[in-house]
Image (spheres, rainbow, N blue to C red):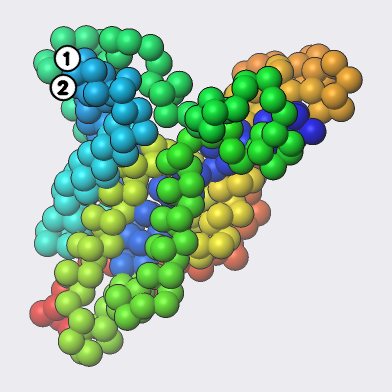
Amino acid sequence: MMIAANIISMTILFAVPLLLVAMGGMFSEHSGVINIALEGMMIIGALFACFTLQGLDQSGFGPAHPQLSMFIAILVAGVTGMIFSLLLGFAAINLKADQTIGGTALNLMAPALVLFLVRIIANQNTLQLATGDSATWFMIKKSTFGIDKNTDLGFFGETFLVKVYLATYVCIILFVILSIILYKTRFGLRLRACGENPQAADSLGINVYKMRYIGTTISGALAGMGGFGFLALAVMIFGNWRPLNIAGASLLFGLFKCIAAAYSSIDINGDGVYWLAEIGISSHLYRMLPYIITLLVLAFTSKKSRAPKAEGIPYDKARR
């Protein structure tokens, strides 16, 4: 039971960021803008989240208020990703540049910019915290509820209440809210109309340029907060640009990320035998599993995927 609880909790841990970033890509592409730059937005968001955590750590606020520090860093990451996404929006919407090339350019620029800023601002090759490991700050533990660490909380408690992050549940709530916004509100209908038939949307008085900017900036915010890039694009395509399908795809890829990260310590039968580690498969293959599965899944499902009709097509109001 404990093994199953650990596998499920780790799967959720990997799946939720994928879910968040894939939802971001979905908002952008439903508005009509292909967002290949999710990777770059994620990197920039992660950088400024790290700067924020480092500053909070040095001030003493981080260790004293770990959960609040985490949310501050997540918000900073989201705002930074949103600002960075404006570059894609300007290139794709105002300049009517090729969106794939523009996104690729931003992906190339982001890591170089990160290395430059880390060395200039932090005078380091890698950002480090002064005290402890930030991951241990943010994780919900049994001590959080005043429970002894040796107490068995049962399958549900061990899976969903301990060794998880509060941000995980916040992201799940955010996923539900975003799904409702996209499919149950006037705003969501207008956004999707701009990705399907922008000429018809414009004829009804909808500002296509504005809606595409909004879709792109929402995408940037979620990518900045989420932390996965190209794998999230695969999840979005496999999920056919639909929230529930994306959730299922995220869990599938999260499971294989879990296996890749912990194959040597997974006791499937609970008999003390770590079968995945003993069957002679190279550790490199396990690390490749999420990406191999990505290629296989896309190879067999991409033909059935239906992207928004007008995605990737620059809209020119003058030619309406």
Percent across and percent down for residue 291 are 57, 35
**Mark seen at residue 67:** none
Which amino acid, mark 2?
Leu
> The C terminus is located in which quarter?
bottom left
Disc 2 element: helix
> The N terminus is located in which quarter?
top right
Decide which of 207, 313 is in the foreground and name it. 207
Judged by depth in the image, the label closer to the viewer, 2 or 1, is 1
Percent across and percent down for residue 269 are 87, 27
Dividing the picture into quadrants, the one containing residue 24 is bottom left
Q: Which residue matches tag 1?
A: 122
Residue 61 visible in the current orientation: yes
Disc 1 element: helix
Q: Which residue matches tag 2?
A: 117
Decide which of 98, 123 is in the foreground and name it. 123
Instruction: Please tell me which residue is depicted at 21% across the width and 45% down the height of the picture.
Output: 79
- Left/right placement of residue 282 relative to residue 142 reads right
Please say if the residues under marks 2 and 1 sit with CB atoms less than 8 Å apart.
yes
Q: Is residue 133 above or below residue 82?
A: above
- Left/right placement of residue 294 relative to residue 83 reads right
Instruction: Please tell me which residue is depicted at 59% across the width and 38% down the height of the picture.
Output: 161
Which amino acid, mark 1?
Ala
